[in-house]
Image (tube, grey):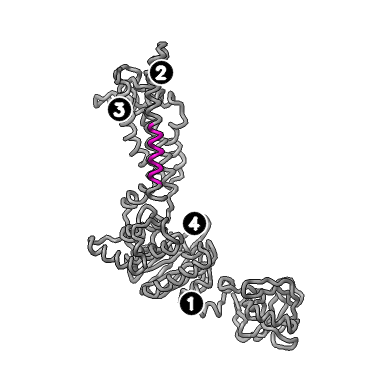
Amino acid sequence: MDFIPLIISLKIAVIATFITFFLGIYAALLIMKMNSRWKWLVDGIFTLPLVLPPTVIGFFLLLILGKNGFVGKFLLNMNIKVIFSWQGAVIAAVVVAFPLMYRTTRGAFEQIDMDLVYAARTLGLSEFKIFWKIIMPLSLPSVGAGTILAFARAMGEFGATLMVAGNIPNKTQTMSLLIYTAVAGGDMELAMHWVLVILVISLSAIFTMNMWTQTQSKQGGI
Amino acid sequence: MSLYVDIKKSLNGFNLDVSLEAGKCTTGLLGASGCGKSMTLKCIAGIEKPDSGVIMLNDKILFDSKKNINIPPQKRNTGYLFQNYALFPNMTTLQNISIGLKLPKQQRDEIVIEKIDKFELSGLEDRYPHQLSGGQQQRVALARILAKEPAILMLDEPFSALDSFLKWQLEQEVINVLDGYNGTTLFVSHSRDEVYRICSDVAIMCNGKIDTFGEKKQVFNKPNTISAAMLTGCKNISKAKKIDETTIEATDWGIRFVIKTHFDDMNFIGVRSRFFKIATENEINSFEIEIIKIIESPFAITVMLKPNGKNTPIFWEVDKPYWEHIKKTGMSKFLSAQPDDIMLLK
């Protein structure tokens, strides 16, 4: 059996999840502290990839990262080409998975009783300590859930990846792209084979998430 | 004065404009919900920022808009007890008490052990807040605050979400703690009884302003504004006009009262429901009544009456045994109020 599509998929999803994890938390904090009247607009932009068709996201990414895009030109000057590379697939996966992480984390942060933060401040705790010792531990079940959702989304990403990274066997061909190619070529057996692999991974992700949320809420009794 | 506050803040159409000085005693802030009591405490603690003004604590400037000083809450050394205690749910009793102490481990442990002992929390060190009773939670919160030896203690309606039995117990515990604390204490409440039992000075707040400030007995016995009278529990208030130097007319009730003192910007009078007496027709300050309704409480009877045929009711409160006695001997058609018991209000 050829493991390469599995490895490509996992590599892209793991790296994308790692990036999304920090970006999502940072964006959630940013929005929470924002007092500007443009907050709704920024929130809208952050959430947009959740509702846009992946092809539209792919289109925008091509505009930005392509030869004539402002980021693409800059990267090209440094001799980096992201279009039709696995790095491009990572970027596509980050963009589509980001709103899931951002929304779940923000929901968790907003549910925290502000009196806890105020009390911590009057007790002399620094903002850094308040975040890591109080806000994060209390949000952990949701942050974990957000991370797993982001991972699952990154792993299943198809449309935007196809447009940005292409469907190059042994390079950018992920499992979902391979299934599409196999079905298009009439090889239902090969498609079924990879469908089962994706099913197993997705089910384990959901199972892990549920187990973890349960143990977390038991521990803290929150 | 160890605490000096003179601040202004507008928020969503609400204007806070508070001037307050408090000594090293317990000062009560009494006011209806939403009058700005908690906002005042939050400004002192540094949780909220006033638009302008000055806050000073023990000669240290905490906030001064003109000098552009705004000390962050972390450096103000205030103790703030929240209504729900705000214990960190992910930390044990021990961790909750020790987290605010920035000291070498040995010193920190000494303080924590001392507080756990003092607040009768031994055996509960490793419990999480949700595993503690309401009373234990309050003790952890107080221990956590006092471990830092704050320069001021602020209690924000600590009893208002409790049932009456627990409320009484916790109130006694707080009174004990306050007896052993020799800094400034601000106690916020909308209950006049709590404020009267716990505090020595009282500030009455109304619509974002301090309406009356003084020693509690003075404020409760001789309130001179309509909001102070209402917040200290006066149920009977009427518009009033001056007839001559010793007489006023309560226009809502159609009664003329003889009074002892007089001041010019008086617009209302108030009489506490306990201060009416059974009278005869010719007695001083007597008026004719008609009983409309009898309201029974566990230990008292409140009688709702129409004075002199007017529609604004008067409430008269008597103890139950006395009421039984009156019912046996027959109710008089007249009540009176002594000149001393009539409060003249702005």
**Label 4: which residue?**
B11
> Residue B294 lies in magenta, yes or no?
no
Q: Which residues are magenta?
A: A204-217
The residue tagged with tag 2: helix, strand or loop? helix
Q: Front-most of B332 and B217? A: B332
For the residues labelled 3 and 1, the Cα–Cα distance comes to 72 Å
Q: Is residue A9 above or below residue B185?
A: above
Pointer 4 indicates a residue of which chain?
Answer: B
- Residue at (36, 31) in percent of width and height: A94
The residue tagged with tag 4: helix, strand or loop? strand
Pointer 1 indicates a residue of which chain?
Answer: B
**Label 1: which residue?**
B214
For the residues labelled 1 and 4, the Cα–Cα distance comes to 28 Å
**Label 3: which residue?**
A11
Callout 2 and callout 1 share a chain: no
- Residue at (44, 61) in percent of width and height: B133
Is disc 4 surrounded by few (<14), some (14 to 19) or many (20+) residues within 10 Å?
few
CB under 8 Å between discs 3 and 4 = no
